[in-house]
Structure formats: structure tokens, C-alpha cells
Image: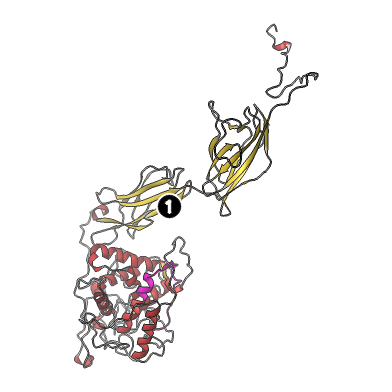
Amino acid sequence: MAANIGHRLRKGATSGVVMAAAVAALAASQAPEAIPPAADNTGGDHAIGAGETAPPSGDHSATGDTSYYTDLPPLTTPKQPGPTTGLPVIAGPAEAGIPASVYSAYKRAELSIRSTDPDCNLPWQLLAGIGKVESGQANGGRVDANGTASPAILGPALNGQGFANITDTDGGAYDGDKTHDRAVGPMQFIPSTWATWGQDANSDGKKDPNNIYDAAQAAGLYLCANDRNLALKADLDQAILSYNHSREYLNTVLSWVAFYERGTHQVPDGTGVLPVDRSDNGGRGDRPVTPLPTVPPTPTPSPKPVTPTPKPSETRPGTVKPPTVPTKPPVTPPVTPSGVPPAAKVTRLAIVANQRLTATTGSAFTGTPRIAALDSAGKPVTGVKIRFEITGTTDSRFADGTTTATVATGATGLASSPALRAGDRTGSFTVRATVVGRTLAAADFAATVTERQADTLTRLDGDALSATTGTSFTQQVQVKATDKGALAPGVLVTAVIVASKTDSAAVAEGPSFKGADGPAVRTVTLRTGTNGLLTFASGDLLAGDKAGAFFIRLTAPGGGTTFVDLTVTAPSTPDPGATPDPTPTGSGTPEATPSPSTSPSA
């Protein structure tokens, strides 16, 4: 939306010199360089000087060239994208936070348009930059569960008072005004432009300019019109100027694009930062958010696009005629005959989230694979059965213990697999998503399981264990495993019986772990319980036949180490003059004389 006549980018900026200084200062810190007019006039603004605007020409822009937010990004570089679970507000410039639904709409629009018009090279950050200056990211993300702005976002009446004079073209269907048009929704489309470019990106059966998903998709198509390649500077400038024919607007949008390209994060809907400065209020803080009239007029189902013809008096001498309305038709999904199953409409699966999954052994993965089922126009398809399958060598499973699951896409064309849980085996595997009943390219998610770790092992009772040869140790041993101070359940701990704390090799004789019949076992692997504790029960350790001092060395992935002292003594030698104990208790004690009741003659 072009700036109101007489106002500039910042409060009090009333000359091209101030405008140039503001843009230059921003460029020196973190904004893109102020863009000079293209040599071939691809931007269409040879007659526009720094800090000046084109004459009102709303019929040649998507927005009617009405007011827009002029706040510039902060000088601090934003944080890189962070986790989105629970949508925490991440430390860093608040302006870098984009409300979750708004961010999702931009990303989905980029994904859809790149699938149907890859040569356009539409970046989602361009949509975010325009959304920032047009509506403050849908008024700080104040949208309902379907992504519709609440209250509706309306620009001022295009009545020629500082803006273009556009007589009503939609019967008030979109903007509630039967006299003049108004820019509508998060991306601020005027009704006549929306009639041509409007989209139903969330598949609710309506093309609603106040819905961020519909509006973002329409804005992306509009920017890509006329076979533009937005990776080229001239085409990028031309696209932005076609949206709002103003040099101030171009530089402001580009500064936000550059800011978002360096990093951003999601914030909960409704908590986004609201900008203050607007091009038509001199910094008074007014916001272009006006609720629809209390009694809205009867909507017109299918308003016809009307392109008002500018009168000769509306063009100042010496100016170049602004760009014409893009002539590239919007991408329209092919008409699918009724009764065709949803799977037949799908042309590809797009990975939406969690392409790379990680977990430690025995724990749940932090995310689940999510895909979007898209048709040939890049629109989501509802009710498609998606098969998720765990492939590769792994004991990881879905929550119900299976390796396959079938899930239907919802109203937004998205499907997520059931929760994944890692087993005891480390390594990599794949979760593959396919369309049931169709032979289409699969969407693969890489998953990796790493060993759970403990950086500290602590014995809870520090006494040495003692036993005589030929017996078992009767004391219980309990060890606590922690990682960064937190209990570490499910950690594999290696226990080795050694001759000294400096030895790494297991002893060849002496104590051993109780096991099946066969050679003595002096190295075992144990796992901590859910409470992070490891317990040796009474009788788990055999003293063996060699007396001396030994140790159990316990180590865990992550560096945790501790020792348990073992003392093995030989049995005492009986005194020849002493009376034998009639109730011997251990090996090495003389056998008792059988009682008469157990003798062969009894």
C-alpha cells in the first residue's frame, strides 16, 4: 500500500534525504541495500525518487496502494529457528517471532507454489515480509483455529482521500463497504484483485481473503505472475512494486525479508509483536484493523473482477504509468469428477515436519513424521490413507508395538504417524510414508537411535563386599546413574571384575558373576531401571576359589564410572582340639556324622 501523500518511512521524515539516510543506516547494520531504480525500468518506477511515491494507482496493485506499517527490523540478528513443540517464545528479538498459524501458511504456500511453478523460486520469507508490513503478521497472529483473522482486517476506504479512489467492485461482499473498496485480510487484497487471484488453500470450500492460508497462497501466485523468477533482483523488485507501487514500500519489505532470512522462530498465535508506525499516520500508533460493520450487506457469491480505468486527470505529468495488472492466470486445480477416491487425486507427498528423527535407547522420539498429500495444483487432499512403515534393522516401534500404521489425511491434507519409541538397539532406520492404493514416490524420514548416557555413577552404600572362597557375596549393591544431575533410566552399564582400579582387563580367576553352568562370567552388561538405579541382589556374585582383593568396575556411556571393592578370604582352619560344630554352614567345614535316622540300616 503506497504511503499517504506527505508522510515518509519514519516519524518526521519529510524529505528524500532523510529517507536515504534511514535506509543507508539500516543497510549498514542488517538490512539490504536501498535499491536504485532498475536500468531497464523493470521495477516500473523511473519517475519515483527516493522517499517519493507513485500517484494513486490502486487499480494497478494488489492492495490499492493504501497504508502499510513502516517499522523496520531491529538491529539485533534474530535467533535461528528453534523447536516448535509447545511453541515456546525463544529468546531473541521479539520481531523475529512469527505466529504459528501465519508461519505455517507461508511455508505451505511456498511448498505448494514451488511444486507447480518451481521457476518462480518463491521464498516464504517474501510472504513474511509482505505480511509484516501489510498487517503485522495478521495482527500479531490473531486468527482462529482455521487461520481466519478475528476480527477481520480491513484497510481504509479507497475514497481518494490520500489513497486511490476505487468505487465498490464487490457489493461489499468482502469488505462490508458498498461505496468504496477496501483492502482486506492479512495480505490486504482489494476485492477486484481477490476476485482474480483468490484461493481456497485450506480446503474449506471458501476463498476468504481474511484467511491466512488462502491469502498467503493467493499472494504467492500474484507475486509469481508474468513468469517472474524471484531469484532475480529485477523480477523480485517488480513483484513487490506490483503489490504496492512505492519505493518506500519496496525497501521496507526487502529489509524484513533479509531479517527473516537470517533466522526466526514461532510464537503462539495472538502473541506476535504489533508494529506501530504506519505510512498514513505519522507514527500515531493507529492500526489498520477495523471490524466488519455490525450488519454486513448480503455477500455476493462470485464477485466479478472489475478493473477501473484511470482517468487522465489521475496521472501527474512526468510520471511513468505504473505496472499493469499481472496477466498470468492463477493456478486452478483441475476439475476432478465426483466419486473419484481421494488417493487418485494425489500427485505427491511432501514432507512437512520431522524429516530427521532422533531418540536414545528405550525412549520416545521427540517428533513424529508428518506429510502433506497434494494434488497437481499443490492443494491438500483430504481423506487420503497414508501408510507409515518402519524399515531397516531396528527394534524401534510405533506406540502400539507395530511396525506399520495407516492414517488418513485431515481437512488440511496433513497426516502424522503414531508416536515412535526407540528400542534397545542403536543405529539408523527409515520411516517410509506411502499412499495406500497408489504407486507414488515415497516420503522417507531418517531416524537414528543413540545409546542413553550417564555422566555419573554413584554407589549408594560404600562398604566393601566380603566373602570366603567357595561362597557367595551376601551384601546388596545399589548404584545410581545420573546425567547432568538428572536420574538416567535405561542406561546400559558394563560391569567388569578387575584386580585393581588401574586394570582394564577382567581377571582370569577369582570372583565371578552368577550365570548359567559353564565358564566363569566376569564381564556383564546391565541396565538401570526406571528410577535410574542398578541393583546387585544377594547371591549374584560368587567369591570363587582365590583369596585376595578385587574390584567391580562399572562404566556407562557418557563417562560415568565407579568401583565396588571385593574382599575374598580363605576359610579359617579348624583347631584340632576343638569340638566340631555339629551344624556346619559352609564349604571347607568337616562333614557331620550321619544321624541314625539317615543311615543305610535305618
User: Residue 167 at what x, y percent from top left?
Assistant: 26, 85
Q: Report whether 13 appears left or right of 495.
A: left
Q: Report whether 332 appears left or right of 9.
A: left
Image height of 541 relative to 529, above or below: above
Pick the quarter of the image with the N terminus.
bottom left
The image quadrant that residue 154 belongs to is bottom left
Instruction: Kindly tell me whether residue 319 is visible in this rendering.
Output: yes
In the rendered image, residue 290 lying in the magenta stretch gets the answer no
Q: Residue furthest front?
A: 502
Tag 1: Cα neighbours inside 10 Å, few (<14), some, or many (≥20)? some
Pick the quarter of the image with the C terminus.
top right
Instruction: Kindly tell me whether residue 302 is visible in this rendering.
Output: no
Which residue does the image show at 34% across and 68% down from the upper left?
Answer: 106
3 vs 18, nearest the viewer: 18
> Which contiguous range is marked in magenta?
256-278
The image quadrant that residue 517 belongs to is top right
User: Residue 130 at what x, y percent from top left?
Assistant: 33, 75
Q: Secondary structure at mark 1?
A: strand
In the rendered image, residue 273 lying in the magenta stretch gets the answer yes
178 vs 367, nearest the viewer: 367
Secondary structure mostly seen in the magenta stretch: loop
127 vs 486, nearest the viewer: 486
Which residue does the image show at 65% across and 39% down from the upper left?
Answer: 565
Q: What's the amino acid at mark 1?
A: Thr
Question: Label 1: which residue?
Answer: 358
User: Residue 111 at what x, y percent from top left?
Assistant: 30, 63
